[in-house]
Amino acid sequence: MTWLRGELRRGVVGAGRRQAAAALVLALAVFLVSQVYDALNHGPNVLFLRTPLDQAMPLVKVFVIPYISLNPVTYVTLVIFLLFRIRVYDSAALSMITALLVSYTFYLLVQSYVARPVVTGDDLFSQLLRGVYRGDNPYNDFPSLHVSISTVLAIHWWRFNRRAGWVAAVWAIVVIASTQLVHQHYLADVAGGLLVAFGASWVWRGVLQGALASPRGIVINPVARQPPG
């Protein structure tokens, strides 16, 4: 119990009112910004980034499972960060919002398109994959949000805890592979998503560390000064 209380003090429970309120505002912002996706998910497209390697990629239906795991893992991860590492939570939420906004800029100005195969069969994986295709138009592809969001989460799990970080890294790699193997993205989309994820995470870590180090900055939660890892 002593260990648990110490861990909780590094989360929202140990934060001041202003920092806790800001964390809740961030949660609302992540949700609201994510809702813009569907409004942009339409043609006409400007980009079609398929390469011969993309054409040679097999359809592996079982990879729909890691593909659809992104949303639940995202929600669970943000709750854990909020409860136990508010600084990691702030960085992760801001990085996610940035990844969403950067991606939306591409979708709005240089929309991309992915050609999908016809999925046959009545097995569970075929049904799930057809559900994914029905619920997500074949646009909004470059950069891949599945790649950027899963990578942002893995980066921040690494900062939260090294052992958990290894697990998150493996999960993110499988999710990234799934974007190819269920034919939702091309290799260029993966590269773009990785660039956005690492860029956003690097920028916000620097900004937040700089704010804490600034003599003019207001440290609302002194306990949160401890290293996140």
Image (cartoon, helix red, strand yellow):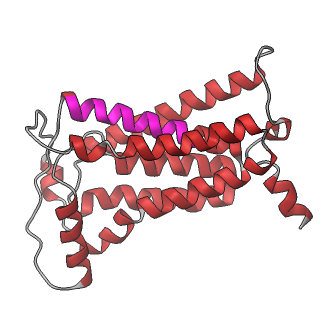
Given residues 98 and 31, the one toward you in this image is 31
Given residues 109 and 175, the one toward you in this image is 109
> Quick one: which residue is furthest to the right in this view?
2
> Quick one: which residue is furthest to the top in this view?
216
**Point 35% across, 71% down: residue:** 65
Q: Looking at the picture, how far across and down is residue 77, in whole percent?
A: 57, 57
Left or right: residue 168 compared with residue 22: left
Q: Looking at the picture, how far across and down is residue 67, in whole percent?
A: 35, 63
Residue 109 appears anywhere in the view:
yes
Q: Which residues are magenta?
A: 92-108
Given residues 85 and 173, the one toward you in this image is 85
Q: Based on the picture, tell me whether residue 102 belongs to the magenta stretch.
A: yes
> Quick one: which residue is furthest to the bottom in this view?
123
Residue 161 appears anywhere in the view:
no
Left or right: residue 13 compared with residue 41: right
Query: How many circles with numbers are drawn on the protein?
Result: 0
Task: Name the image quarter holding the N terminus.
Answer: bottom right
Q: Is residue 52 above or below residue 212?
A: below
Q: Is residue 182 above or below residue 161?
A: below
Q: Based on the picture, tell me whether residue 224 belongs to the magenta stretch.
A: no
**Point 78% across, 14% down: residue:** 216
Given residues 81 and 229, the one toward you in this image is 81
Main SS of residues in magenta? helix
Q: Looking at the picture, how far across and down is residue 145, in whole percent?
A: 35, 46
Q: Looking at the picture, how far across and down is residue 159, in whole percent?
A: 66, 46
Left or right: residue 167 compared with residue 46: right
**Point 25% across, 63% down: residue:** 181
Left or right: residue 131 compared with residue 18: left
**Point 10% across, 64% down: residue:** 117
